[in-house]
Amino acid sequence: MGTPPDGQEPALEEVFYPAEQVPFVEWGAFSGGKSTVLATGVVTLVSFLTGLSHLSQATPTLDGPLTVVLAVPPAVAQFGGVLFAFVLGIVTVGLQRRKRIAWRAAVVLVPALAAVPLLTLQTTDVPLLAAIALAVPLLVRNRDRFDQSVDLSPLQLASLLSIVGVVVYGTVGAYGLRDQFTGEPLSWADAFYFVMVTIATVGYGDFTPTTPEAKLFSLSIILFGTGAFTVAVGALVGPLIESRMANAFGIMTASELTLLDDHVVVLGYGDVTDSLLDELTDETDLVVVTDDADVAASLDEDLNVLTEDPTDETVLSDARVDAARGVVVGSDDDARDVLAVLAAKRVNPEVRVVAAATEEKHVEKFESVGADEVINPRTIGGQLLGRSVLDEATTESVVEGLDPVAGDDAPD
């Protein structure tokens, strides 16, 4: 876990820095899901830069070891780095959202990318090989971290299928009318190229319909293609924009929390939460779960805030309580906090849960539902005032002897 900073409250020290669990190196922090995403992102960036280096050469020399067994045109090596980078950029976004299909794509694409530097084997290719060598073991090691399926709405699925349908319709139709265009009869590659250029409304003019049938067919591609792409953009990009706008108001989605690990989940928001957040923000990742939208919007934008019901087990699963270091329950409503403790223990029976009891009479209720530690801020405040005035000692020395729960039974 690590050594607590000087001046750490004893209760927090006991909860988050137990003496019996201090590993020499926290390897999970360097080889977990976040590191895998970061390594794949580095491969993407280095691949793009390597591709730009190859593109700056008139004709790259193919002197690598793979040229003995793999004969490819120089243009493949020249454009390979940039093309891989664009695809891996999409894959990296998928990995960040813990999508299984993105992991599968990365496992294939990242090792395959090594073929580019192994064909050219220039000095500028060495960083790319090093990045790949780092990313591949992390992908293999953390394969279980990326277990989310791609959940598409019926509209999103229909929009994607409509795009595929228009491309297939246009390619087959253009090839069927291949003699009714200018120039030589269209090949399959020419037909596909014509469809993509037409849908994109670029219109280079290298293939032009010459008969009424071909012209009407071209118009149908324009109508169907632009319509399909417009619907697809609205269906696929719209939710992303809504997610970003919601995040600006302090609302996060579950997918944005999927890679959190060894973090602290704070359930509810109350009088003690502000000081708690100040105490822990620099020490670990935090997720605050509150159903008060105004409170969520007022919190620091660097905090992970999930605006949902903190007593809902599904919400706690989204907040990754199953992978959390600890859970703090600290609203001003003891009844709801008891339910939050119960929900947290149902999601992860092994997680350490600390609760702040507003009333001392509710301490036993928190303990009965599984809270590992119950803090009574009012009791602590009274003990601190009393001992400070009688002992004339500093706050730091007095706080070491405080009982976080008991009032009259506190040790002298």
Image (cartoon, rainbow, N blue to C red):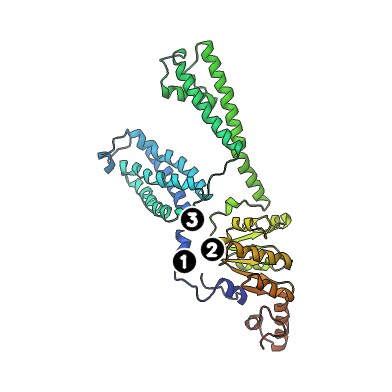
The answer to whether 380 is drawn above or below residue 264 in the figure is: below
Label 1: which residue? 26
**Quadrant for the C terminus in the image:** bottom right
Label 3: which residue? 33
Q: Could you say which quadrant of the image residue 222 lies in?
A: top right
Compared across the picture, whether 349 is left or right of 32 comes to right
Q: Where is residue 353 in the image (x, y as percent from the top left)?
A: 61, 69
Label 2: which residue? 262
Q: At 57% across and 58% down in the image, what residue appears?
A: 320
Could you say whether the residue bearing mark 2 is in a helix, strand or loop? loop
Q: Where is residue 36 in the image (x, y as percent from the top left)?
A: 46, 54
Residue extending farthest to the left is: 68
**Circles 2, 3 touching at the beta carbon (< 8 Å):** no
Counting residues from the start of the chain, the first of labels 2 and 3 encountered is 3
Q: Distance between the residues labelled 3 and 1?
A: 14 Å
Residue 74 in view: yes
Residue extending farthest to the top is: 211
Residue type for callout 2: Asp
Q: Is residue 320 or residue 314 the one in the foreground?
A: 314
- All told, the count of numbered labels is 3
Could you say whether the residue bearing mark 3 is in a helix, strand or loop? helix
Q: Is residue 348 or residue 143 the one in the foreground?
A: 348
**Circles 2, 1 touching at the beta carbon (< 8 Å):** yes
Q: Position of residue 22 (x, y in %)?
A: 49, 73
Point out which mark residue 117 bears. none
